[in-house]
Amino acid sequence: MRWYLVTMLAIAFLVGILFRATEVTGMRIWNMFGTMGIFFFGLVGSLALSRLQQRSGNKQVEAALKALEPDWVITDWQGKSGGMPDYLLVGPTGILSICVDQTPQSSFGWLARPAIQRGRRRAEAAASWVRTRLGDQSDTPVLPLLLLARRKAVEEYTADGVVALNPDQLATYLRSSGQPVLLESPARIRLTRLLREHSQGNG
């Protein structure tokens, strides 16, 4: 964020100089460059706001996941390639394969829907990656879940077998699922180790 702030200050200073040059020299071409500077100021400001919102959304995701411990064993695979989920959670009722979506609230509905749909496809593909690596534990339920970090999750976003939630809804969703306990603590740890071992060749 510091880089964005410094850049915006530099642009603002330069714009001021350009408009002052117009007054001093009478050459209106400096106005054109000053106007372009205002455009770039807005562009950098927009990027800074987006970055700030993304950081805030990621913090909410991390806080929501942290609140599930110690019942759920959490593995952070953000940024890894190979079709893995962003987060793997192994808990009493099975496995959560979580992908995080950064579609902003400011996106119009007609733009957001395709982005959410792509997120659902990614979440289902990640869940498939998990299922194919369970070995003799293949009967363990794997739920693909899309966490919307920056956009309100509405009912229509849950589709194609993928649940879409906001981070603050996750704990309530798991409590209200009514699923029986399938994995005791030792089994959760074994499954987590198994899947982490499989991930080593994908990083």
Image (tube, grey):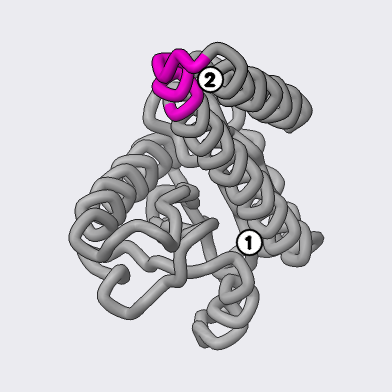
Nearest to N terminus: mark 1 or mark 2:
2
- Residue 195 higher or lower than 101, as above or below: above
Q: Is residue 166 magenta?
A: no
Residue situated in front as seen by the camera: 186 or 120: 120
Which residue, given by chain and number where applicable, does mark 2 sit on?
Answer: 22
Residue 48 as seen in the image, left or right of residue 145:
right
What's the magenta bit mostly, secondary-structure-wise? Answer: helix
Residue 62 as seen in the image, left or right of residue 202:
right
Do we see residue 63 in this rendering?
yes
Q: Residue at x 46, y 63 (%)?
A: 151
Q: Residue at x 59, y 45 (%)?
A: 49
Region in magenta: 26-35
Q: Nearer the viewer, mark 1 or mark 2?
A: 2
Q: Residue at x 42, y 71 (%)?
A: 153
Q: Quadrant of residue 175?
A: bottom right
Q: Residue at x 44, y 43 (%)?
A: 136
User: Which amino acid does the dot numbered 1 rest on?
Assistant: Gly
Residue 107 image point, x, y percent: 34, 57
Q: Is residue 34 magenta?
A: yes
Residue situated in front as seen by the camera: 157 or 16: 16
Which residue, given by chain and number where applicable, does mark 1 sit on?
Answer: 91
